[in-house]
Image (cartoon, rainbow, N blue to C red):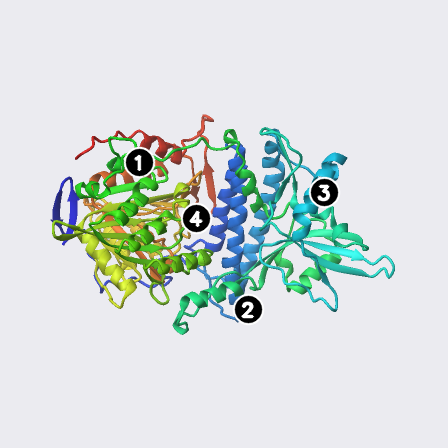
Amino acid sequence: MMKRMDAENLVDETPAYDIDDDFEPWAANADATLPHDRYIDRELSWLSFNQRVLELAEDQTLPVLERTNFLAIFASNLDEFFMVRVAGLKRRIITGIAVPTNVGKAPLDVLADVAERAHALQLRHATAFRELVYPELARAGITLVEFASLDAAERAQLRDVFSKQIFPVLMPLAVDPAHPFPYISGLSLNLAVRVRHPKTLKEQFARLKVPTNVLPRFVRVGAGSARSVRYVLLEDLIANHLGDLFPGMEVLDHHLFRVTRNEDVEIDEDETENLLQALEKELLRRRFGPPVRLEVQDGIDQVTLDLLVRELDITEQEIYRLPGPLDLRGLFDLGRLDRPELKYAPYVPTTPVAFQTSEPNQPADIFAALRRQDVLVHHPYESFATSVQAFLEQAAHDPDVLAIKQTLYRTSGDSPVVEALIAAAEAGKQVLALVEIKARFDEQNNIEWARKLERAGVHVVYGLVGLKTHCKLALVIRQEKGQLRHYSHIGTGNYNPKTSRIYEDLGLFTADDQVGKDLTRLFNELSGYAIERKFKRLLVAPLHLRKGLLKAILAEQSNAEAGKPSGIRIKANSLVDEAIIDALYHASRAGVPIDIWVRGICAIRPGQEDYSQNIRVRSTLGRYLEHSRIFRFVGDGEPLVYIGSADMMHRNLDRRIEALVRLTRPEHIADIDEMFDLAMSDTTASWALESDGTWLRRSIAEDGAPLADMQDRLMQIIQSRPRLAVRR
């Protein structure tokens, strides 16, 4: 039986949809009643997502430094797309693995489609900076100037900067019979330099890395003022001092270029005894992956380009000719300027009402609050520090706490969460940390934390072979009046105080004994050899989360066919799983109203008269990265609502440990409904997915007034919540 928390009392009830082990989903793409073109290509859908990011950069109603950040986010996103998604397509082509994509296309054809779209987007991105964002930055007193335009005094100042701070770091590498073409590391910015010997007239090539990893990309010119700053790009400053690097030679030409490589990590865990050491070795090899993109500045001479293409083994399709500057990730630096009037108005997260105290500096008794009721927190509108962090810190120092168990997927470099676990272990408590060291692009950081935890006496495990542990779980075991009590947190986002300020996430705190027992069994499965086939208030992947969601969708379809109330609402980062999509199509055919709220990839095709006319899809992007996952089913008057870490992708449902927890308090379900009502409203700014796969932005009403901003509205709602009287 499942426990439902109703006000102060625990009430036994049977769950609306129990999870049967024998419930089998239909095979993806095997449904002859649905058309073959019912999915949207996932790679092109991802590029559409990044286009939505770019449209925010182009939006002149947003503060200019926020638009600058969106340009940098677009660039960073696209880099990762090439390093992982495009690299994966290329790997399949090279190895001859002819696995079709979700729309049935061969990888070679998809790669061509991606290249065409990516070329157009990169040019649009460059244009947005040069013609839309930079002019506004200049009007605000933030300008980029060319070294050649500076007066003598300014050049002398920058020459001094170059000599003392830049020149000693530079490493020019010649290319000739005695010096083979150097390795070009992924995402590095480089100058291709052609020089000539003045006597022999022999031309030679050299590569010079622009060390943006250790030096600032924007070099300040003069003192300036808070309201007026000028910068020279690092590569421009270096290019104007090439004579110092090649004395006695004539510098004929120089051009910027940048290479993107396959940087996805692959480890055969079955053949690896020490996963930590194997991953470290793979990280060293990562930077030697094959190239998948060559970015060059417009105007590069053909001799230099031919050399790069030949040495890097790059195809014409993989060459991206762009107006400068290259690598606009550097714009993150400008976004950090102390110009608050050019940014979003500051927002200070509130302490969740249940954790508020009568005195401003008095810490809350988290355990006492949870004994009264479940608490649903919403970051970053509500504070991570006064909820999740406070929960773990209180547990670490509470003498009645016997054990803490937690998953860590991505952590910050100075994580108070990790410090709390270390403090707990040093205090003699039993502490288990399941560190997912295979979290993409955070592997090295997680390895360092894993070793620090081990040195402190924390029991560190790395999950199950072949499965990433992606769920966000924390369990505290506390002794109370001679009995053990469970206090649990299940979230949609990482235990990372830094990203919690910019990632929108939900988290459920509960003292429900059934949830605690579920988590205890799940942690035993992750750290030992237990195999759990049933959980009461959780849906856990890969064993039965997919089955549970499919059965819930089927129940809504049956309710609609029987004339009963029905409805499905899903919020996710990505929706590409074919079995889930097909189930939603069948539910739509039966008359179930379906709302999909997605941030990124969405392969579902809404608005098709035969099979998806009852499906609406919206996307919301803004100052916070929408990250929570929610699954809401009407349930014929008995709502079934889950939150958790799982997206609707094959990897999440089949190759990861994921967990969803059921919400039971009516107030929490009402909060979820309010969020969806806002997101899907025609008066809220959003992007709508059209039946042809295009996304249409709606930000202005018919009368010309701006539509409501979803995230601004949630700030107002949460800030206006009344404080509860403190209960003692």
Mark 2 residue type: Ile
Q: Which mark is residue 600?
A: 4
Q: x and y percent of residue 58 in the render?
A: 54, 37
What amino acid is labelled 3 in the image? Arg
Q: Of the residues tagged 1 and 4, which is closer to the observer? A: 1
Is there any visible trace of residue 568 in the rendered image? no
The C terminus, quarter of image: top left
Q: Where is residue 602? Give x, y as percent.
A: 42, 50
Instruction: Bin the neighbour count of mark 1 within 10 Å (Cα to Cα): few under 14, some 14-19, many 20 and up.
Output: many
Who comes first in sequence, dot 3 or dot 1?
3
Check whether the beta carbons of the residues at disc 3 and disc 4 lie within 8 A of each other: no
Q: Nearer the viewer, mark 2 or mark 3?
A: 3
Q: Looking at the picture, which amino acid does disc 4 mark?
A: Gly
Residue at image x 13%, y 53%?
A: 483
- The span from disc 3 to disc 1 (Cα, nearest Å) is 51 Å
Residue at the spot of label 1: 351
Residue under numbered circle 3: 159
Q: Dot 2 lies on which element?
A: helix
Which numbered dot is residue 94? 2
Check disc 1 and give the amino acid type: Thr
Quick check: 509 left or right of 656?
left
Marks 2 and 3, the one that precedes in the sequence: 2
